[in-house]
Amino acid sequence: MPDVRDGLRDGLRSALDGAGVVPAPVEISIERPRDRSHGEWSSNVALAAARAAGRRPRELAEQIVIHLSAQPPPHVVAVEAAGPGFVNFRLAPSWLHEVLGEVIDAGAAGYARSEAGAGHPVSVEFVSANPTGPLHAGHGRWAAYGDSLCRLLEHCGHRVCREFYVNDRGGQIDLFTASLEARSRGDEPPSDGYHGEYVTEWAAEMPGGADARQWGLERAHRDQAETLAAMNVAFDLYTSESSLVGRGAMDDILEDLRSREMVYEWDGAVWLRTGDLGDSADRVLVKSDGEPTYFLPDIAYHREKFSRGEMVIDILGADHHGYVPRMRAALAALGHSGEAYEAVVGQNVTLRRGGAEVSLSKRAGDMVLVSDLLDEVGPDVTRLVYLLQSIDTTQTIDIDVVSAQSAENPVYYVQYAHARIHSLGRVAAARGVQRASLSEVDLAVLVHERELDVLRALASLPDTVQAALRARAPHQVTGWARELAAAFHRFWHDCPILRDDVSEELRQARLWLVEGARVGLAVALGILGVSAPERL
C-alpha cells in the first residue's frame, strides 16, 4: 500500500508546476508537525524551492495552498500556509483506517519491515566480557542493547553475525587463575586478584588435579552463556584470543601491514602509522621485549570480522573512547573505508535499591549479577529496562520501581497493555463474540480521538523503526511501545467494546483496532527481544 505521503508529494509537485516552479526540488520533505494542532503532515517545500524560483517563501506557500485546495490529494480535507513558508495538511481519518488495514494485512511478521539492508551482512560484536567471572549488571546493558540492535538490523533486511570476543590471554587471566588456586587451598587470593564470592564457590567445584586456568575459563564461559541465554541472547560466534594467536593471525596481520608499509621500528618496538590515518598518535603493536600489545590481536580479529560482513559494528564500554579512532585508523591501513566500521560507546549503569546505590565491582564481593536481576524481575523486565534510554547516557535502574506492578513502572505499563488485549480475547470468547472478517467491517466508524490516537501510533511505527536503525538506537522503539501502550490504555478506558450499549458495527471495528495494537506491540517487542505476557 502506498504511503499517504506519496500522494502529498505528488500534489505538491503538481502545485509547484502550477505556480511555475520548474524543476521542483528532487526531494520533497513531509514531516509530522511537533504540534498536532498544525495538522497531520507538514512540508517545508516552499522554503526549499523559493530561492531558486526567485519567490518569497510565504508567498509561494500561499500559491501552493490555492492549487492544492482546488485539487486536494487523497484524504486531505484542508491545506494551510504557516510560518515563514510551511504547508500544513489536515487529513480525514480515512488515511488512518487504511493504515489499520495495512497493519492487519502485514501482521507481526511483516509490518514496519523494510529491505533497507538489502541482505548486506553485518558483524556485530557485543558484551565480550573477560572470562574471569559471572556477568555483572553492567554487562546486561551491552547484552540487551547489542542483541536488540541485531534484531533491528535483521528487521530491516541485514544479515547479522552476533560475535563475542573472549579475551583469554593476559594478566587478568593470570590473576583469575591464581585466585581460583588460592581459594581451592583455603587461602586468600592475591591482593589484586578476584575476591568475589563466586571464586570461592567455583574453587569448591573444581576437581582435584584440574588445570585451574583452563577449568576456570570454561566455568566462566558456561556461566556467562547461561545468563545470556536467560536474557534471550545468543551468539553466532565466539572467538578466543588465544586461538586467534595460536593459528598465526597476529603474524599474518603484521606481515600484511608491513607489506603496505604501514609499520616501522623505533626504540626496539614495532609501531603502526595510525597517526597518519586520523588517530592522535602512532600505536605500538609489538613492545621492545617482543611481546605484542593487546592492539595487534584486536586488529587481526577485526580483519576476520570483515571476512564475515561488509560492515563491522563494535559495542564498547565507557572507557573505550580512545580505542575507536585507533581501530578505525588500523582498519584504514588495511584498506577498509571509514563507513564500513562503526563503534557505539556506551555509558555505565548504576543500580539502586532502597534509595542506596549497589556496587557492580567484579573484584569485590558485593557486586550485583545479571542473574540477580533476572531472578528478581525476570528476563522481559530485565531486557526492557536496559532499553529505556540511549546507551550513550548513564543509566540508573531502581530495582524497587522496576519490580513493582504499577503505572510508575514503564515496563509493567507496556506489558499491561499486551495483557489487556489478551484478556479481551478471553472475555469475548467466553461471551461467544467473534471478530468478523476485516473485509466485512466498516472501519470508518473509528472516529473517536482515543481510537485515532492508537491509529496514529501504529502509523508512526515504520518511521520509528527506520529512525532507530539510522541512529543505532533500539531505545526509540521502546519509546514507541510506551507511547502505543499509553494510547491503548486511554482507548481502553474511554471506548468500551463488549458493553451491551455498543453497536455491533462499532464493536467489530474496535476489535480490529485492538488486533492492530497487538500487531504493533508484537513488532516492537520482537525487535526489543521481549516476549510480552498474556496475563499479569
Image (cartoon, rainbow, N blue to C red):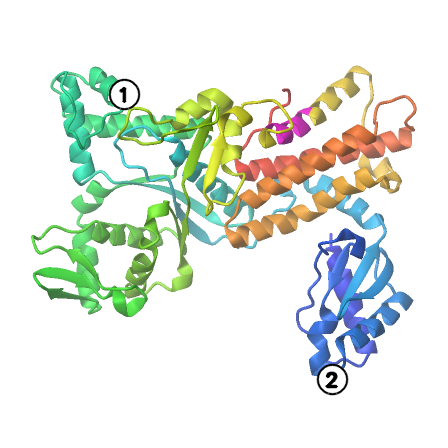
- Which region of the structure is painted magenta? 412-419
Point out which mark residue 463 bears.
none
What residue did someone put label 2 on? 54
Q: Is residue 479 left or right of residue 172?
A: right
The residue located at (28%, 22%) in the rendering is 198
Residue 401 horizontal/vertical position (percent): 55, 27
In the rendered image, the vertical position of residue 443 relative to residue 402, given as above or below: below
The mark found on residue 197 in the picture is 1
Residue under the image location 57 percent in, 36 percent down: 526
* Residue 330 visible (yes or no): yes
Amino acid marked by disc 2: Gly
Question: Which picture quadrant has residue 271?
Answer: bottom left
> Image check: 102 left or right of 333?
right
In front here: 97 or 365? 365
Q: CA distance from mark 2 to mark 1?
A: 75 Å
Quarter containing the C terminus: top right
